[in-house]
Amino acid sequence: MPSQGPEREIVHLLRAVTVELGLHSARFAQRNAMHPTDVRALIALMDASRAGEEMTAGRLGAELGLNSAGTTSLIDRLERAGHVRRVRGREDRRKVVVEVDERAVELGQAFFGPLIGRAVELLQAYDEGERAAIRGFLTGVREAAAEGT
Amino acid sequence: MPSQGPEREIVHLLRAVTVELGLHSARFAQRNAMHPTDVRALIALMDASRAGEEMTAGRLGAELGLNSAGTTSLIDRLERAGHVRRVRGREDRRKVVVEVDERAVELGQAFFGPLIGRAVELLQAYDEGERAAIRGFLTGVREAAAEGT
DNA sequence: CGTATTATCTCGTCCAGCGAGATACTCGAT
DNA sequence: ATCGAGTATCTCGCTGGACGAGATAATACG
């Protein structure tokens, strides 16, 4: 039972990283009087905007695993705090497109920027083969986790 | 703004992995009628027991970021579900030692085992230098995230 | 046009977690 | 011994995030 191989140690380490990143997000949330879900929502919104996609209320809720009622109150909350704007879709006017406020983006970058920068620094110290290994491992784990049994 | 370096892509990938692992845990939680916090608690308890340490109510609450009231109701919930036992500390009888039930451990292993096994497989395909790179990167990120500004 | 479908919102409810304070035990000082 | 301070956990009342059911509004299709 004890003394597992070096592979298990790394798996354990990965889990520790996810825990630590979660706590980091929680600190951001608390500092800005937000809930974990709000932070997840902002991240999803920024991802979408970076990918040049519009994020509607429904899609956002689906990605976060909320039902429609929860999604509405989430957007209400974010809008009340000024982090987000509701814009009725012009093509399909049933839809509500959610746009992130510029200041919320800056807030997030100010908080997460240093950590991202540090990670980039770490990666620059490795050669292309090593980076490929890191990329391959992470990709594999992501796919394994995504295949929800 | 677009077309960032290969380093940023990996950072993005790491975040995607944490999201996916979070969703995986959430599936486990939902399937066993538990809340995310309950799963986090069980993991903390199993970690402690693997490390040969006793986990008290207070320490558990502190690790999860709950106050005493929340911790009590968490343990109530887990005990009601039979995942956990309360044992009064014999040395200091104010303390409540929380022990994980054997069946809860098996439940967790059955669910997370395959994913862990897959990750170990992935790692075995790399040579020692590549594994060192993966380990180093993850360690660096964990430390960077832990230094909460 | 009317019916089905889709997107979002409203209402009532439940329960995880919080703050405040009660209770139970330990330990050091008198 | 016993008193008081400190510590660990629990109880009570409440807030607010999220859910289920159903209402409302806009689109699509016959």
Image (spheres, coloured by chain):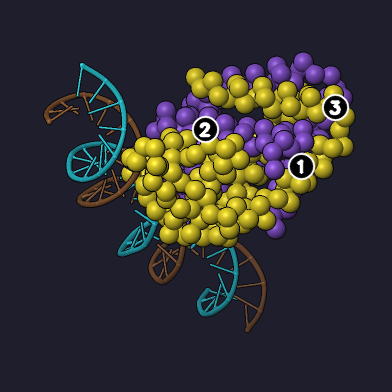
Chain colours: A yellow, B purple, C brown, D cyan
Nearest the eye: A129 or C14 = A129
- State whether discs 1 and 2 lie on one chain: no
Tell which circle, 1 or 3, labels the residue nearer the N-terminal end: 1
For the residues labelled 3 and 2, the Cα–Cα distance comes to: 31 Å
CB within 8 Å, label 1 to label 3: no
Whether residue A113 is visible to the viewer of this picture, yes or no, is yes
Same-chain check, marks 1 and 3: yes
> Label for residue A128?
3
Q: Identify the mark at residue B97; answer none if there is no mark.
A: none
Q: Where is mark 2, residue-wise?
A: B23
User: The disc labelled 3 sits on which kind of residue?
Assistant: Glu
What quarter of the picture does the C terminus of chain B occupy?
bottom right
Of the two numbered discs 1 and 2 in the rendering, the one whose residue sits closer to the viewer:
1
Q: Residues within 10 Å of mark 2 (few under 14, many from 20)?
A: some
Instruction: State the separation of the CA atoms marked 1 and 2.
Output: 23 Å
Instruction: Name the residue type under label 1.
Output: Ala
Give coordinates of residue B4: x percent, y percent: 74, 37
